[in-house]
Image (cartoon, rainbow, N blue to C red):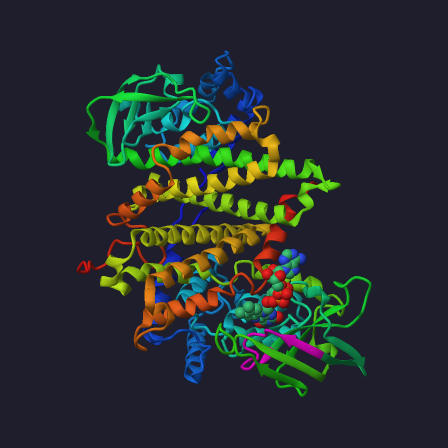
Amino acid sequence: MEDAVDFKDSERSAALRQDLRGLVSDAVPETFLGAFTSDPKDLELAQSFCRLLAKKGQLTPAWPVEYGGSASSQWEQTVVREEMWAHFEPRGAQYMGVNWVGPAIMRFGTDIQKAEHLGRIASGDVIWCQGFSEPESGSDLASLRTAAIADGGGWRIEGQKVWTSYATMADWCFLLARTTRGEKKHHGITVFLVPMDRPGIRVVPIKAMVGPHHLNEVFFEGVKVGPEDVLGEVDGGWNIVREALAFERVGIARYARCDRLLNLAPSALGDRWDGLPIELKQRWAAALLHVRQARLLAYRVIEMQETGAVDPADAAAYRIAATTADQEAAEVLMDMLEERAVGAEKPTDLFDRAVDDHWRYAQAATVASGSIEVQRMLLSRSLLRTS
Amino acid sequence: MNTELTEEALEIGRVVHAALTKAGGVDIARAVEGGTAGPDATDILARIGVWELRPRESVDDAEAAAAVCRAAGRVALPVPVAERLSSAPESGYDALAVVGAVPRVNLAAASSDLRWAVIDGAGVRSPVTSIGPMLNTQLGGLVSPVEIGAGEDDLAALPLALTLPCWTLLGMMDSAMAMTRQHLLDRKQFGQPLASFQALQFRLADTATALLGFDELAKYTLWSVVTGQPGALVDAIACRLAAIETAEILFRTGHQMHGAMGFCDEVDLSWLSRHSQPARRLPWGKSQTQARLLDAMTELPFDGLYGQGLVGIVPTATG
Ligand SMILES: Cc1cc2nc3c(=O)[nH]c(=O)nc-3n(C[C@H](O)[C@H](O)[C@H](O)COP(=O)(O)OP(=O)(O)OC[C@H]3O[C@@H](n4cnc5c(N)ncnc54)[C@H](O)[C@@H]3O)c2cc1C
């Protein structure tokens, strides 16, 4: 007989979850609201927390053992993702390296590239940034113009990236540049793995409401790269991008932070909870329900990941649900703070500060890593396909 | 973690769907509402073994029952499938419907040979002592007022009785989605299929997302209810709220995208839209269900990753 539906964590997942909660409560202070603040101590904390996780094999549990993982299931990787995001991502900027840069190098890298990068990602020693978006190329990523101009046996990179998260602190950049100007814009793009300290790279932070370090400009002025820096085939970068993004289907477990903050609200608000309008409490209950639905849609995609292929349309549906639930939860929580929504009274009002942070970051949920409109295009194209 | 129904459950769903489609699909509802003798759908389901399922006793049967309700919903079958599968014949009733303050039961008169019982939101189950005439209205044509006898406490029966009708609604929504998609591909305006307009594509994507999210929730709720999780009842109420919200999205999108055609009796969408109404309005509509969800949360855990809703909160002095 086949197994019946079962929505409980497996024993291994449950044990991992307990373990991670213990680790977070021991190593991460309650005041921590992410690595990307103006206080450099927050980043230091994240870096040492990552190394701690890595030592326990919990930074990249789903990676193969030979690359520094423990060959666990995607479910365990999901538990890590949920626990980390719910606690304001004490892995700092690691999730890019862990979730898609590493897997892309496993799939397309040379032996030398694998040896150079995978161990360092798995041990939490290195921060990657994603050099995709440009001033003129956002949703239409394939129109990118940063040029790799043939120069000797290699290339010279000229151009500009923008919105590059963590660029000020990154050691490496997963860079897209155009090696050939072909008839079709998807052709002629190449992926370069470039160290951020290479001469000619200049990073300019952008002040933004999502907080420091999230958005930067990166200028490439005559940056020299060689064939050894190319990931996969020259001119074949678009395929890598498509596959790399497929590793990142579930992305951030936004629903986990919503779940935690909504569940904290009644006790955090104390006496004020009782005075809230009943209509607002009902919206709170509905938000919890929608967050549950978003989580279940994530699990649907993870189950597909475990058993084979994930249709980008299914991942898109999950992203639509998760990002809108994120914003719904943010609005409900802000409403619950009443006048404190525009500023906590004291720095020790941790819940108020957490909601403030959550609301600001949630605004970007439907824009970052492929806007909700792009997700709708993906999903509707699949729904309306006739063959 | 396993988020899929068993293959056996899916298979019985497919068998029921095929049999009902062969018997006329939505035409079965047309015949019943029109008072003409149609195919005997109850008998068709009997031959497949549907009435032998015991969802309250076995998880496998519960999954099969859910799949059957969904298949019945796809053609708006005028047979009380969810109600029969929520029953406990050994306790003296063959069909169980959840009712509000004024008891009205969909499909009771159409299956008046059954021993009907109703249960209220507090879990009091009462026998139906008489079934009134069908309302014969557009939105509740097959609904009847009922009179009930003395009740007894049977709270344990409530979660499943709330959950299975959500599966029937899910089937109705599956059909609404499929019809809407097909209409977008077939209908041309401004020289191109409606499917080529981004405004409609995006709305379809959001509608499909709502449906998928409800589909997953329906499975989660079934699991919670049949495995007797502590939050089973609050989960079932939440599922009902999601069913109402999602049906509103699905049928609103369906009607809008069909244009005038969607209101015609000739078109199945119109039948599904009307026949989905009893399940959406009875026993409680959206606001009542919302209010009940919040109430239920004060006593029962609404399990999330980081808490249980209002359970376990230290009570505070009322201000
Ligand atoms: C917090 C944050 C972090 C980010 N980090 C990175 C990073 O590390 N690396 C990186 O490369 N990029 C990063 N980005 C950039 C991100 O990938 C882009 O913002 C995103 O792809 C959208 O591009 P855009 O901002 O240029 O908006 P645009 O593409 O200009 O779009 C503006 C609006 O128009 C809509 N739109 C565009 N085209 C269409 C169409 N054909 N039909 C309908 N609607 C359309 C969009 O959906 C959007 O709503 C980040 C963004 C944010 C907000």
Residue A316 against residue B268 in the figure, above or below:
below
Residue B68 against residue B317 in the figure, above or below:
above
Q: Is residue A192 part of the magenta span, yes or no? A: no
Residue sitting at x 62%, y 76%: A173
Q: Is residue A169 part of the magenta span, yes or no? A: yes
The image shows residue A248 at horizontal and vertical percentages of: 56, 61
Write down which quadrant ligand 1 falls in.
bottom right
Q: Nearer the viewer, residue B303 or B177?
A: B177
**Residue reaching furthest bottom?**
A199
What stretch of residues is rendered in magenta? A159-172
Q: Is residue B100 left or right of residue B279?
A: left
Q: Nearer the viewer, residue B223 or A149?
A: A149
Residue B293 against residue B278 in the figure, above or below:
below
**Looking at the image, can residue A22 be seen?**
no
The image shows residue A246 at horizontal and vertical percentages of: 60, 59
Q: Is residue A128 left or right of residue B120?
A: right
What secondary structure do most residues of the magenta stretch adopt?
A: loop
Q: Nearer the viewer, residue A222 or B248?
A: B248
Residue sitting at x 58%, y 45%: B204
Q: Nearer the viewer, residue B263 or A269?
A: B263
Q: Quadrant of residue B104?
A: top left
